[in-house]
Image (cartoon, grey):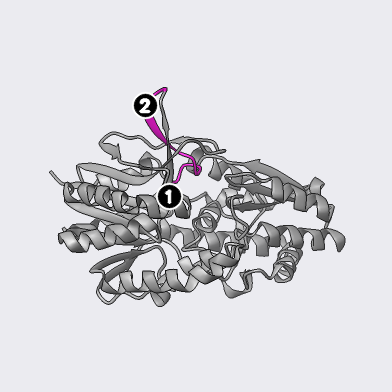
Amino acid sequence: MKNAVFIHDHNFIYNKLDGKYYDGSGGAFDEKLWSRYLKIFDNLTVVGRLVEKLPNKLVLSSSKNVKFNLIENFSGFRNFFKKRKNIKKELARVISINDFAIIRLPSTLGAWAYEICIQQNKKFVLEIVGDPFEAYWYHGHWAGKIMAPYEMLKLKSIVRNADNVIYVTQRKLQERYPSQKASIGISNVRLMNVVNVENVSSFYNRDYDKIKIGLIGSFHVKYKGHVEALNALKFLVDTGLTNLELNLVGTGDPSWVIEMAENLGISDKVKIIGSIEAGEKGIFPFLDQIYLYIHPSKTEGLPRVILEAMSRGKMCLGSDVGGTNELLEEKFIHTPGNWRALSFQIREILKLEIEERIEIALQNRLTAYNYLEETLQANREKFIKRIL
């Protein structure tokens, strides 16, 4: 019997009423994620952060053969330094009683787990899902710009010395955080299928009174593209494109976005959807009624939501961060923060003939085929089983 431990800084909630654990991020850490590892291991222990509550829709994370070992009150500098020793001790205990560790980085718990695995001579794999330099640099606080170079160098060192690394990109993260040993690119997107060609043609052949533009990103931070999207929308409306509606999906408090839209005078053009579930129960139905998906984020690994939109046969625009340029052609990519370029791209796409829009959407659908769960999981299982 083989047992594994999954380690990341993700927040989970314990519901005392039903004795189960929930993911407040919209469902990315649900039983379907754990099933990826349970196809290789008999049991999985999840190490993350335990929080009291999140202002989001909760999705069940508890699953058969999955146990949670969560760290309480692990936030802020005071708790960080006060509890560091005890947390590391508990991490070492959990890692010692498991056969294998799946360490998702960047994360504080993940970095500590890496050190412990080296000390214990424990087999492990790193999952590199984002760029800490971009995340800290664009966080919106001056301290982030101080931390960004340090966090980048720390992850470079970890990845360089690790025996086995899985990246969510094919090139971008590999170039900044190179591995000297065994590595592979496997996206963490979860696509079970792609939309039919007929559905794509039918959607774009209709007339619409309102052109719905979609953006998916947490409202907790200001680097997911909301500022750029709102400024681009304001510019487009002022230049005569008054039939646009920006639909925003994400966890967290959107009050700052609402206030910005009011100040720009475009409140009637912005619709806050809030948090919805992942996959077939939430994100995909939302994307199915979107005409154009934009993702002007300032930091990404491989933007999963762009791939999800592509799988639904949607035209997409994105900023040049993470692995976006592995998914979209150069003409559909703009530099991070450049809302003027984004507005120009939106305007140019809406000038295209219907046949041209359908061609773009179908090409995106074709690209998404390479990221179907069946293909990615086969590569993931093969890589981890080789380590074992």
Q: Please tell me which residue is depicted at 17% across the width and 58% down the height of the picture.
A: 122
Q: Kindly tell me whether residue 372 is visible in this rendering.
A: no
The image's mark for residue 19 is 2
Q: Earlier in the sequence, mark 2 or mark 1?
A: 2
Q: Please say whether residue 27 is one of the residues in the magenta stretch.
A: yes
Q: As shown in the figure, which amino acid type bears the numbered disc 2?
A: Gly
> Which percent across, then down, holds residue 345?
70, 68
Q: How far apart in space, not on screen, are marks 2 and 1 (Cα)?
A: 26 Å
> Which is more toward the observer, 279 or 135?
135
Q: On the rendered structure, is 41 left or right of 145?
A: left
Q: On the rendered structure, is 288 left or right of 73?
A: right
Q: Please tell me which residue is depicted at 42% across the width and 58% down the height of the picture.
A: 371
Q: Quadrant of the C terminus?
A: bottom left
Q: As shown in the figure, which amino acid type bears the numbered disc 1?
A: Asn
For the residues carrying marks 2 and 1, which lies nearer the camera in this image? 1
> Which percent across, then down, holds residue 348?
74, 68
**Residue placed furthest toward the left:** 1
- Per the picture, the main secondary structure of the magenta-coloured stretch is loop
**Residue placed furthest toward the top:** 17
* Span colored in magenta: 17-28
Of helix, strand and loop, which one carries label 1? Answer: helix
Q: On the rendered structure, is 106 left or right of 4?
A: right
Q: Please tell me which residue is depicted at 37% across the width and 30% down the height of the picture.
A: 20
> Which percent across, then down, holds residue 260?
76, 53
Label 2: few (<14), some or many (≥20) within 10 Å? few
Q: How many marks?
A: 2
> Which percent across, then down, holds residue 155?
37, 69
Q: Which residue is mark 1?
A: 79
Q: Please tell me which residue is depicted at 74% across the width and 66% down the height of the picture.
A: 343
Q: Please say whether residue 189 is one of the residues in the magenta stretch.
A: no
